[in-house]
Image (cartoon, rainbow, N blue to C red):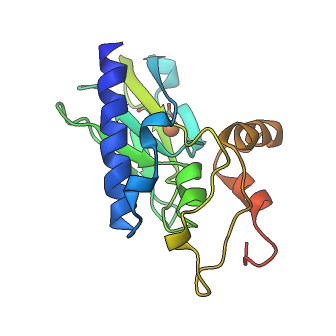
Amino acid sequence: MRYCGAVHELFIGLGVKLAEGLGVKSGNIRFENWPSRCRMNKYHFTPETVGSPGVRTHTDSGFLTIIQDDDVVGGLEVMKNSGEFIAVDPLPGTLFVNLGDMATVWSNRRFCNVKHRVQCKEAKIRFSIASFLSGPREAVEPPPELVDDEHPRVYVATTYEEYRNLRFLMKLQAGETLALLCTSSSDK
Ligand SMILES: O=C(O)CCC(=O)C(=O)O
Ligand SMILES: [Fe+2]
């Protein structure tokens, strides 16, 4: 409980910085009311699973993710724009922060939902704690500062729950479902 509370505080601090970094008045956004949840992962990597995926390529569906990764056993990889994966090697004492699909919607596509995966590299048990800040409870819409003639609205308003259900129904895990939310004026 203490860990999740501390991570939630960190989410709020990061949310404020991210908003301000885009020139958005963060005082108008109630990040503290955005739900977050924590999940502990245990990967039972064996000699047979070396070289295969622990978690397939995906984007996170929410706004922000904080991963506390295994201190010793690597495997997390992020995809560059070129499609090439780069390893995020274990670095004890650090946290890995990632932006998800809701960050792309909220920022009117200024933030990139990063594709990533976990590969089995060695036959060892691997632990991680993944915490997710999903987004506001109400429909996710870009703040007014991020919409103007040069940056028309890219996505229709949707709640995180609606989007997650749609993504689940489509069985598409790497952010492809966002294309279904594009407004008629956006270029998809
Ligand atoms: O275990 C990890 O390092 C990452 C897990 C992950 O990407 C996720 O739970 O969404
Ligand atoms: Fe993930």
Q: Quadrant of residue 74?
A: top left
The residue most toward the bottom is 150
- For image coordinates 34% across by 62% down, the residue present is 20
- For image coordinates 34% across by 22% down, the residue present is 5
- For image coordinates 77% across by 36% down, the residue present is 165
Q: Position of residue 185 (x, y in %)?
A: 77, 79
The residue most toward the front is 28
Q: Is residue 124 visible?
A: no
Q: Quadrant of residue 125?
A: top left
Locate residue 74 relative to residue 140 in the image: left or right.
left
Q: Position of residue 135 (x, y in %)?
A: 55, 42
Q: Is residue 33 visible?
A: yes
- For image coordinates 44% across by 42% down, the residue present is 31
Given residues 162 and 65, the one toward you in this image is 162
Locate residue 158 relative to residue 8 in the image: left or right.
right
Q: Position of residue 69 (x, y in %)?
A: 32, 29
Q: Is residue 26 above or below residue 69?
A: below
Q: Is residue 64 above or below residue 127?
A: below
Question: Which image quadrant: the N terminus?
Answer: top left
Question: Which image quadrant: the C terminus?
Answer: bottom right
Locate residue 120 relative to residue 151 in the image: left or right.
left
Q: Is residue 65 above or below residue 175?
A: above
Given residues 98 and 157, the one toward you in this image is 157
